[in-house]
Image (cartoon, rainbow, N blue to C red):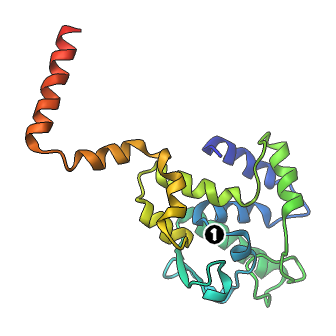
Amino acid sequence: MTREESVRLLDEASREPQAPHLTDFIRLALNTGCRKGELLGLEWKRVDLQAGLILLEADHTKTLKRRSVPINADAREAILSRSRFRARHCPLSPWVFCHEDGSRVLDLKRSFTTARKRAGIEDFRVHDLRHTCAAWLVSAGVPLTAVRDLLGHTTVKMTERYAHLAPENVRAAVAMIESDESRLSHVGKLKVVTTTG
């Protein structure tokens, strides 16, 4: 999903009266790469705003491995929005994503699909928010190993599917091992081409 599409999706999500949590869920998913189940099962006791982390214990993750997920400014705002909702409606609820009665939000497929269609985005599922986060990170030059750790992939192999999004990063990495002579030769050739052509 492009940045422009994400803005449209968030705008349409904010118009879903039956799902006041949808906008915050999308923002958090796009900015953390967390899975749907990891977010919908998130409890307040595992959100550390002071440290800027979401703590996922092994039993909360698909891979059964503990990890911490950094919270950026957009993710923080989504969490604070959820906190305000909780304070207004259900101050004792342990769930970050809850209904007004404090019960846990179990799914959001219907409201997400409605918002997605109204935003004019085709063939895009809730899980694709996670893929979008990964794609944006790789396109921004974040190393695959860092993306692997954030997403909780067991191996970098799973993360390599995003490598094609940053060919310039790979080109720059290969250029690092060129010899000085090779670099100078390459620069000289470029000068010949540009002056004659």
Taking the spot 24% from the left edge, 9% from the top edge, the residue there is 197
Is 56 drawn above or below residue 5 in the view shown?
Answer: below
Taking the spot 36% from the left edge, 47% from the top edge, the residue there is 170
Q: Position of residue 130 (x, y in %)?
A: 64, 61
Res. 33 image quadrant: bottom right
Is 138 drawn above or below residue 153 in the view shown?
Answer: above
Q: Position of residue 72 (x, y in %)?
A: 52, 66
Q: Quick one: which residue is furthest to the front in this view?
A: 157
Would residue 177 be found to the left or right of residue 143 on screen? Answer: left
Q: Amino acid at mark 1?
A: Cys
Mark 1 surroundings within 10 Å by alpha-carbon count, few (fewer than 14), some (14 through 19), many (20 or more) = many
Q: Position of residue 118 (x, y in %)?
A: 85, 43
Res. 54 image quadrant: bottom right
User: Which residue position is annotated with label 1?
Assistant: 34
Residue nearest the viewer, comparing 66 with 26: 66
Is 68 drawn above or below residue 173 in the view shown?
Answer: below
Give the tally of numbered discs.
1
Is 39 drawn above or below residue 20 in the view shown?
Answer: below
Q: Secondary structure at mark 1?
A: loop
Res. 27 image quadrant: bottom right
Taking the spot 69% from the left edge, 56% from the top edge, the residue there is 128
Q: Quick one: which residue is furthest to the top in this view?
A: 196
